Image (cartoon, rainbow, N blue to C red):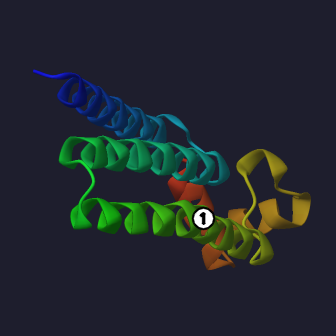
Amino acid sequence: MNLQEIISISLIAIGIIFLIFGTIAMFRFKDFYPRVLTATKVDTVGMITLLVGLSVRHGLSFFTLKLIFIMVIIFILNPLVAHVVARSAYICGYKLKGEMDEESAECCEDDQMDWCATITDEEGGDA
């Protein structure tokens, strides 16, 4: 094994470890907003590290240019899409369980609003 293979294998392994930790964090966090934040940051770092490892492994070639193009797309679009999803949830009135005001809590108790039922279902409460 030469130095190029050692560096590429270690970068690929680091990227896979980031992706595994991101998957574990998705199950560990219970609220929507921390899940979006964790998924965005960890997936972006993990995928870029993995693709850098693949680029080092294949050397300078047309395949490496394709990987760099994919890295740029991931670097720009992954946080942008997560921002749009989180902002749309915020604008639509999605609130965490601890942030519910009295009116929202009454709606959840009466099952008058579908989104309230969805919020309590996701958090393990009764709808």
Q: Is residue 78 above or below residue 25?
A: below
Residue nearest the observer in this picture, 108 or 1: 1
- Residue behind mark 1: 82
At 55% from the left and 38% from the top, the residue drawn is 29
Spot occupied by residue 31 in the image (x, y as percentages of width and height):
62, 47
Check the image and name the residue furthest to the front. 60
Q: Is residue 73 above or below residue 3?
A: below
Residue nearest the observer in this picture, 48 or 123: 48
The C terminus - image quarter: bottom right
Q: Is residue 102 above or below residue 17?
A: below
Identify the amino acid type marked 1.
Ala
Residue nearest the observer in this picture, 93 or 114: 93
The N terminus - image quarter: top left
Identify the image quadrant of residue 63: bottom left
- SS assignment at label 1: helix
At 29% from the left and 49% from the top, the residue drawn is 55
Residue nearest the observer in this picture, 38 or 109: 38
Give neighbour class at mark 1: few <14, some 14-19, many 20+ (Cα, 10 Å): some
Spot occupied by residue 38 in the image (x, y as percentages of width and height):
56, 44
* Left or right of residue 105, residue 69 in this image: left
At 72% from the left and 66% from the top, the residue drawn is 94
At 66% from the left and 68% from the top, the residue drawn is 116
Identify the image quadrant of residue 111: bottom right
Identify the image quadrant of residue 2: top left
Spot occupied by residue 35 in the image (x, y as percentages of width and height):
56, 48
Spot occupied by residue 20 in the image (x, y as percentages of width and height):
34, 35
